Amino acid sequence: MPLAALVCCAVLLATCLLGAWATRSVSGAFAPAVGWMVAAFVLSMPVSNGSVIITNTAAGRWYLYGGTVSAVAAVALSFRGWIRRAGTRAR
């Protein structure tokens, strides 16, 4: 398993969860998740000259599918009340 791809997935998960916690809303996780998905899948599409940024290797697949699972998991976790409660307890 490519370690760098898994680290990127963990960073994406943390970014989305921290965004939800900071805004105390689901949109805080949804915005970076959608942005990552659009950018990642556009970069994985071939262009007219035949080059692809994210290749069909083990690392590329772990990055695309692991990142998608991380983004969806972060959005799903942000629906839970702990993000809203954790933000209000800090005051």
Image: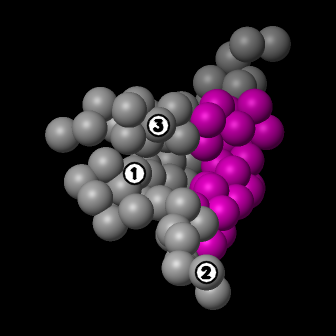
Q: Which mark is residue 33?
A: none
Q: Give SS at disc 2.
A: loop
Quadrant of the snapshot with the C terminus: top right
Q: Pick the residue in front: 80 or 72.
A: 72
Number of residues whose C-alpha sits closer than 10 Å to that of mark 2, classed few (under 14), some (14–19) or many (20 or more) = few
The disc, 3 or 2, on the residue closer to the chain's N-terminal end is 3
Give the Cα distance between marks 3 and 1. Answer: 7 Å
Measured as percent of width and height from the top left, residue 38 is found at 65, 69
In this rendering, which labeled residue sits more in front, label 2 or label 1? Answer: 2
The reply to whether callout 3 and callout 1 are in contact (CB within 8 Å) is yes
Residue named by callout 1: 63
Q: Is 30 contained in the magenta span?
A: yes
Q: Is 44 contained in the magenta span?
A: no
Give the Cα distance between marks 2 and 1. Answer: 23 Å
The type of residue carrying mark 1 is Tyr
Residue plotted at (62% across, 56% down) = 36
Residue plotted at (34% across, 37% down) = 6
Q: Is residue 51 left or right of residue 27?
A: left
What colour scheme governs how the chains and residues are painted in the rendered image of this protein? one colour
Residue named by callout 2: 49
Q: How many numbered discs sit on the rendered protein?
A: 3
Task: In the rendered view, tell whether residue 15 sits above or below residue 70.
Answer: above
